[in-house]
Every structure is written in C-alpha cells, then in structure tokens.
Image: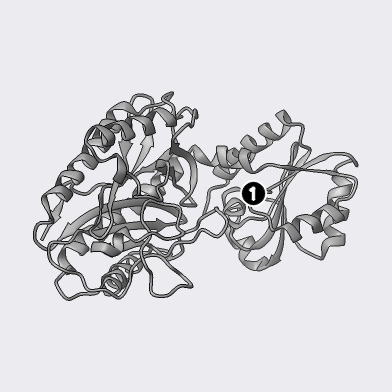
Amino acid sequence: MTPYKELQERIGKLQETMRKEDLAGALLIQRADLFYFSGTGQNAQLFIPAEGKPTLIVKKSMARAEQESKLEQIIPYDGSDKLKKYITELLPKGSKIGIETDVLPANLYFRYQKMLEGYQLADISRAIRKIRAIKSDYELGLMREAAKISTAIFKQARIIIREGLTEIELAGQLEEHARSMGHQGAVRMRGFNQELYYGHIMSGENAAAISFFDGPTGGSGLNPSFPQGAGPGLIKRNEPILVDFVSVLGGYMVDQTRIFCLGEPPAHLQEAYKIAVFIKNTLLTMGKAGVTTGSIYEKAEQIASEAGLGNHFMGYVEKVSFVGHGVGLELDELPVIARGSDTPLEEGMVFALEPKFVFPGEGTVGIEDTLVVESRQLKQLTSYSDQLQII
C-alpha cells in the first residue's frame, strides 16, 4: 500500500500548484490519478482543497477503500446532491475547481458543470501530469522491481523461441510467465482510444504492419476489433522477432524491447540494429537534467539520417515524431522525447527510449530501455544484453 507520507507529499505538491493557479479545490476521478493521490483504485472521487485535508468519496467498495487508502477522511458517496452540498459548504460560489478535462467524458463534464453551477471548472490535468512525471524513491523502487520481471521475460524469450511457433503462441507463453511473477496484466494508457495488451510481440513483416497505435510499430492483431500486436503467423528463420514488452508491478511499469532471430537476419537489418544501439548509447551520454527533450530527439534523428536510415526511423510512411515517452502508472506519461519539444529534463523523470527502424515487408529492428533522469546522466532501470539475440 502507498505510504501515508508518500500521499501527503503528492497532495502537498498539487495543493501548492492549485494555490499558484488560483484553484480553490480539485475533484479527481480518473483511476490512475485517483490511485496516485489516494492509494486506492476503487470507484471513488477524490476532493482536494487548496488548503486542508482531502476527502475520498467512495461509491464502491467502501470496505476496500478503507483498507487500501491511508487517507484520513474517507466517506461513502450518497449521490450527487450530497456531493454538491459537501463542496458548496467548503468553497464559496465563484471558486475555481480543477478537473481532469483531458480524460473526463463530455457527458460527465456537463453533469459536473450542472451540479456545480456558480463555480468555475478549470483543467488541472497538465499540473497532475507534471507532478506525476517526477518519480519518488518509493516509485523508483517499484519500477526497479518491475524491471526484474522484464529481464526474466527476455531470458525466457531466448529459451522458448523456436521455428514453427506462432506469434500469438509466443506472446501467450511470455504473458503467462509474466503473470506468474506478479504482473498485474493491465497496461494503462491515458490517451483517448489508446490501449495495449502487454506489448508488441511480432515477427517479420507483421512487425512492420501499420496500425492505429501511437507508436512506431503496430501489427495485425488477431482481428479488426483490436488491430495491433501479435497475429497468427508463424515465426520463421532469418526474420527479426520484435519483443516489445511492458512489465508492470504494484501499478508501476517499465517498457523494454529486444530483437531476437532464428539465425541471422539480412545484413542491412543488422546494421540498422547497430545504429539503434548507437543512438541509445549516444543519448545516454547526452541526457541529463536540464537538457531539452526536443534536442534529444533531434540528435537521434540526426544520427539516423546520417546513417542513411532517416526514411525508416520511427516508422515508415506513417511515422511518429518521438523517440521516447514517460512511463509510470501509465505508458504515455510525461516527458515525451519529441520533435520541437522544449521541455527540460528534470531529476526523477522516467522515460522509455526506443530508437527503432521499420522496413516494410521485412520487419522492425531497434532497442528500448526505461531510463531515469539524474543530475549528470541518464541511468537505465531495465537491463538485458544490447546484443542482437541470434538463436
């Protein structure tokens, strides 16, 4: 369970931001945010005043919430009228109340707007995401434990990959192995209509198949309702096998990718893989607190272009303009290592760096590791050999 001191520090940071932005309170309902500030993922709403103690208002399950959360004020939800009465007794009319407009469904927003008539509803999403971007020692400890699962997954992949195995069979066996070590299963994403099941485990041309997913790889999936990830195709010799796996423990995730192959892939794919590793190592040296995310992306793109691989970097035709993304309770946190971004890295930020090259009809090669920003360097949380895994 999240320690009380940890919750206090998180809530204190949000209250400090609220006071700066002239917000009298915040009403949070999104599950990842709710868990971050309360320590429970039950069906609830968390009201945080700019001054004073927060109150967790629980619809279901009250018993679980009281068991899981260390907050002092936990009350049952008795309907919107009672919630309105609770807030109006605390805050005068005309006050600004922060809500998570980046994820709140429109109909729920309008319901809050009607319920809190006379108050100003303002977005607090960006402030929450910036606070969550800086990981505490407690959070980093959980992510290091998740990284142990990740290492075990890649060791297991090398053992079980064989000719004749289908992508979905490989994915299922690795997922089972992860679950046996405590993986929670769900990989949370904040972006609208973005979803992921463990990761992308694909081989050959399927690893270069384009999909809706906001990343360099997509894959066919098993049907059009979930058009990404592993498909029914057989794993073949001399084709790169992409194992891009998200390991989650205690709610916190790390993201890691390695390339396996039964025999050697074509020489140009091996060379592209070496460039991907070179990009990662160059950015490890370059990155530290104060360096902007945009400059990191530009360096990666420059190396890819100078190697003659610019057209394949982070996709082909339908490319993405980032080479890294924040991770934590969700897979798409801040910071984003993207073109044109002027966000400076800060100590405690954690992001997955994933230089990849996509070759239509042939596959994807690249590498990914989860890194934490320190004052003078980037430090890897994930660990496994950077070598192309030829079996």
Q: Is residue 145 visible?
A: no
Q: Secondary structure at mark 1?
A: loop
- In percent of the image, x 24 and y 34: which residue is there? 281
In this view, 137 is above or below 2: above
- In percent of the image, x 65 and y 38: which residue is there? 14
Which residue in the protein does label 1 denote?
102
Residue 49: give x, y in percent of width and height: 75, 41
- In percent of the image, x 38 and y 59: which residue is there? 210
Is 61 situated left or right of 84 in this image? Answer: left
Residue 18: give x, y in percent of width and height: 71, 35
Amino acid carrying label 1: it is: Asp
Quadrant for residue 222, please give it. bottom left
Q: Nearer the viewer, residue 338 or 345?
A: 338
Q: Is residue 261 visible?
A: yes
Q: Quadrant of the C terminus?
A: bottom left
Q: Nearer the viewer, residue 16 or 237?
A: 237
